[in-house]
Image: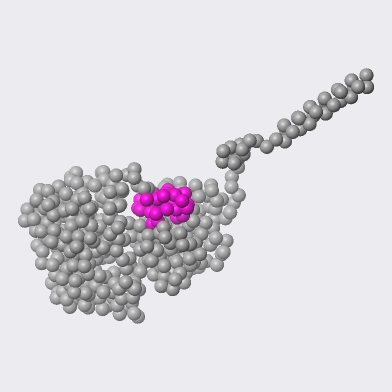
Amino acid sequence: MKKLLALLLAMVMVLGLAACGKKDETPPADDKGQTDTQTPATQEPAAAGEITLWTYPIGDWGKEDKVKAITDAFTADTGITVKVEYLAYADGDDKVNSAITAKSAPDLIMEGPERLVTNWGDKGYLVDLSDMLDDTDKSEINAAAMTACTHPNGAVYEYPLVVTAHCMAINLDAFKEAGADVYLDLENHTWTTNDFINAVEALYDHFQAPVGAVYCKGQGGDQGTRALVNNLYNGTFATPEHDRYTWDDSANIQALEQLKSMPGITFDASLEGGDEIKVFYQGILKMAFCWNIAQQLNPNQADTGAGKTANGEEIVFMGFPAQGRTPALQGGIWGFGIFDNGDQAKIDNAKTFIKWMCDSEHTVDAVKTANYFAARSAAEGTDLTGIWADNEIMNEYQVLMPYLGDYYQVTKGWAGARTEWWTMLQKVGEGADIAETVATYAKNANDAAAG
């Protein structure tokens, strides 16, 4: 009997141990080494504070619904909430400057080097982001963008997200009608200076009206007129060191003289870049000097289909004409800067935001929100070179990216130089001596920058 009782007791103990072992067993790991457990759907990340972002209308970064989608994803990942204010170019600078004066600047600002590096960074308002960039980052980021985002003192005041190349556009149907399409290299979207001169002559002879306008009402779209003049005879706008304006060189004078002599080209002080686009879109002008991928995707913001005029004529983007056919295109660079508001926690959170947007697996979404091209080739192992492979127009437009030229907008005294430029064009259009006029206004720009 004692032996039977002992045997029964042993069996009970074994079963009890087995049950305990089953209860405490760790769920099997999946093939990634993670356990098969799930966080309850109601669980939210711990709050990590709030940061403010002010953004200019850079592609869809100017649209609240698009930005909310990507900032909500960022918050879900990090717990950091983002309060966004949308700026317009008409008064955005005034709002930012007023906020700086009132010591209420945002934590983050999204724009280009001419504001972030040459203006607010140069004045000491922004945080140096050099510590966010290692040698791998610098090798992946477009060299022109990296240079433009770096102040002469070595500080990086902008972390670049996207780049683009500004260009011009032509009405291909009008060119074909006038027989001027023979002067176009449509595969590479380039043409020579002589091609341009011959095409304008053919178009003017056929339509008996100006076909292109050197617009000069104000600074709007002035990157187009600068690129047109600089490229025709390989002129420059500023020194490589960005310490002086050089648009008074003989090549630019020759270009202005050539343009002024052409019946098909008018100097129009009633138009800015946006006005020129409207006239081009209506089919009145046969070429536009103020163009980029945003216009190609949605001409005149008319939502009538990509690459078409109001009359359904085909619009083709082109590099500016150059003697050697290879243009130096004015670029656009946009990214993020951090205002130094004295709160290290906010600065750290802002750096987390920049890393998430500009150098992570999420960079694809951030770039696509801008509707431009990635400023780097890869982000933490994610290849960005084929980001637009599924978009025919964006993918084709990338043929222009190797033509990006010097980003001279970071030259000292930039704001004043822009005014001197379009005022000079007005005087040329009125018939003033071109060499004297160019010399006068270039000197004005350099004197103001030096002062």
Placement of the N terminus among the 4 image quadrants: top right
Asked if residue 106 shows in the view, the reply is no
Percent across and percent down for residue 364 are 42, 49
Q: Quadrant of residue 50?
A: bottom right
In the displayed orientation, state which residue is furthest to the front. Answer: 3
Percent across and percent down for residue 144 are 35, 63
Bounds of the magenta span? 357-385
Left or right: 414, with 315 as reference point:
right
Asked if residue 137 shows in the view, the reply is yes
Left or right: 55, with 342 as reference point:
left
Percent across and percent down for residue 317 are 23, 52
Which residue is pictured at 85% across the width and 26% down the height?
A: 10
Q: Is 76 covered by the magenta stretch? A: no
Q: Is 372 covered by the magenta stretch? A: yes
Which residue is pictured at 28% across the width and 59% down the height?
A: 403
In the displayed orientation, state which residue is furthest to the right. Answer: 2
Left or right: 28, with 92 as reference point:
right
Determine whether 259 is above or below 359 in the image. below
Placement of the C terminus among the 4 image quadrants: bottom left
Left or right: 119, with 32 as reference point:
left
Q: Quadrant of residue 409?
A: bottom left
Percent across and percent down for residue 443 are 26, 78
Which residue is pictured at 44% across the width and 49% down the height?
A: 382
